[in-house]
Image: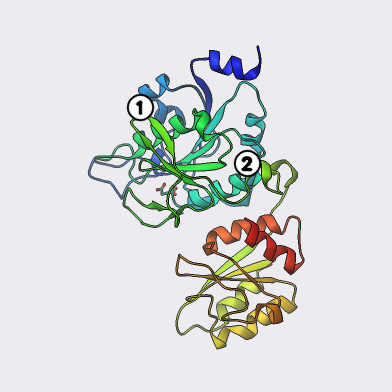
């Protein structure tokens, strides 16, 4: 029997559910605690036990990799999670992965996986804005939908996906945009599709390379460089910039105002940064649009980069990966255009 006919003969996909903590693993003192509760207290087995209907979707095995709020995810966790998923995806007896994750940095982790996993098998990262103990928690349905997507052939080859509020987002585009609402996740160009009545429906594809077509492989990355983010505001002086430059960063993402405008009070410190070998990436704090190279600032003259359309926190992930292979400004800029 070929692998495809074997898969067709099988009734259910084989999914590994990896728990890492977050609100989806949280518990409040009362059902009305929708926004104030303890995070990362339920195990992945507890979460799954509350969703018996998931058994009808897939043969599910569980792993508890971490039990932390996602604000605590650092490069160590990204690498550990990525390598674990990569080794699971290599197995013929596993069809897809679902990762339960805090929502705060879910977009960063998902983007990292999207760019470094070398498999077309579905990987879905899912969280919840309300803990399972809260009235109208989104946790159970989000998890159900995530398993639906991970178990579907339709999700093959689409990279890492974030499923939330009935929507399927590409990891490249999705951003958390709200502190407490259930429709917190938005992609600037819209979701790829929806989950409707337990069925995934896709309407568009990720346009930029990912997973098997990206230049990074999680198995080849042992460490990531320190890349910092500076958030611009009115009345800024350069003290914060100089402090970050002295902290050992290899690059700084400057989340500038508007279309990458840099205050006169800041320009000298960023010019000096580049002279010290630290890359400077001009982004925007607006949360939308592209930063135009050589428009608000002479990037060619200063040897700076621009983020294209990525928000600063996701530009940081891309820059950390870019720095694993490139140090030349032109090639690093190509990475932002390409991904
Ligand atoms: C976290 O990101 O771990 C806390 C918040 C959440 O999961 O919604």
Q: Nearer the viewer, residue 253 or 41?
A: 253
Residue 82 tag number: 2
> Can residue 17 be seen by looking at this rendering?
no
**Residue drawn 61% across the image and 84% down it:** 267
Residue 205, horizontal then vertical, whole percent: 52, 45
Asked whether mark 1 lies closer than 8 Å to ligand 1, one says no
* On screen, residue 227 above or below 219: below
Alpha-carbon neighbours of circle 1 within 10 Å: few (<14), some, or many (≥20)? few
What is the CA distance from the residue labelled 1 to the residue labelled 2? 27 Å
The residue positioned farthest toward the bottom in the image shown = 264
Residue 96 tag number: none
The residue positioned farthest toward the front in the image shown = 203
Residue 149, horizontal then vertical, whole percent: 46, 33
Quadrant where the C terminus is found in the figure: bottom right
Residue 38, horizontal then vertical, whole percent: 36, 44
* On screen, residue 184 above or below 42: below
Q: Nearer the viewer, residue 55 or 9?
A: 9
Q: Quadrant of residue 249?
A: bottom right
* On screen, residue 203 above or below 188: above
Quadrant where the N terminus is found in the figure: top right
- State left or right for residue 152 relative to residue 84: left
**Residue drawn 71% across the image and 51% down it:** 223
- State left or right for residue 298 relative to residue 160: right
**Residue drawn 73% across the image and 55% down it:** 324
**Residue drawn 64% across the image and 82% down it:** 298
SS at circle 2:
helix
Residue 188, horizontal then vertical, whole percent: 44, 57
SS at circle 1:
loop
Residue identified by numbered label 1: 50
| Mark closer to the chain start, 1 or 2 | 1
Q: Quadrant of residue 93?
A: top right
> Can residue 224 be seen by looking at this rendering?
yes
């Amino acid at each position: 029997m070929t692998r495809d006919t074997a898969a067709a003969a099988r009734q259910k996909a084989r999914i590994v559910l990896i728990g890492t903590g977050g609100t989806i693993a949280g518990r409040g003192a009362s059902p009305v605690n929708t926004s104030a509760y303890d995070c990362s207290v339920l195990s992945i087995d507890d979460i799954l036990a509350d969703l018996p209907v998931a058994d009808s979707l897939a043969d599910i095995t569980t792993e508890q990799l971490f039990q932390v709020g996602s604000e605590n995810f650092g490069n160590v966790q990204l690498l550990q999670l990525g390598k674990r998923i990569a080794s699971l995806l290599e197995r013929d007896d596993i069809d897809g992965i679902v990762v339960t994750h805090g929502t705060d940095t879910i977009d960063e982790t998902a983007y990292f996986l999207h760019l470094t996993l070398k498999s077309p098998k579905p990987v879905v990262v899912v969280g919840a804005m309300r803990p399972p103990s809260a009235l109208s928690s989104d946790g159970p349905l989000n998890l159900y939908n995530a398993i639906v997507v991970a178990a579907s052939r339709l999700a093959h080859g689409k990279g890492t996906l974030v499923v939330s509020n009935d929507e399927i987002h590409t990891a490249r585009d999705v951003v958390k945009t709200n502190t407490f609402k259930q429709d917190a996740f938005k992609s600037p160009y819209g979701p790829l599709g929806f989950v409707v009545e337990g069925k995934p429906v896709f309407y568009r594809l990720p346009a930029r390379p990912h997973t098997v077509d990206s230049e990074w492989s999680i198995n080849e990355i042992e460490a990531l460089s320190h890349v910092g983010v500076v958030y611009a505001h009115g009345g800024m002086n350069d003290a914060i910039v100089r402090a970050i430059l002295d902290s050992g960063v290899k690059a700084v993402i400057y989340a500038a105002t508007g279309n990458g405008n840099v205050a006169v009070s800041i320009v000298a410190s960023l010019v000096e940064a580049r002279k010290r070998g630290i890359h400077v990436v001009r982004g925007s704090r607006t949360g939308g649009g592209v930063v135009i190279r050589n428009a608000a600032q002479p990037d060619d003259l200063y040897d700076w980069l621009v983020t294209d359309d990525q928000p600063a926190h996701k530009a940081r992930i891309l820059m950390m990966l870019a720095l694993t292979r490139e140090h030349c400004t032109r090639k690093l800029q190509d990475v932002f255009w390409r991904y």
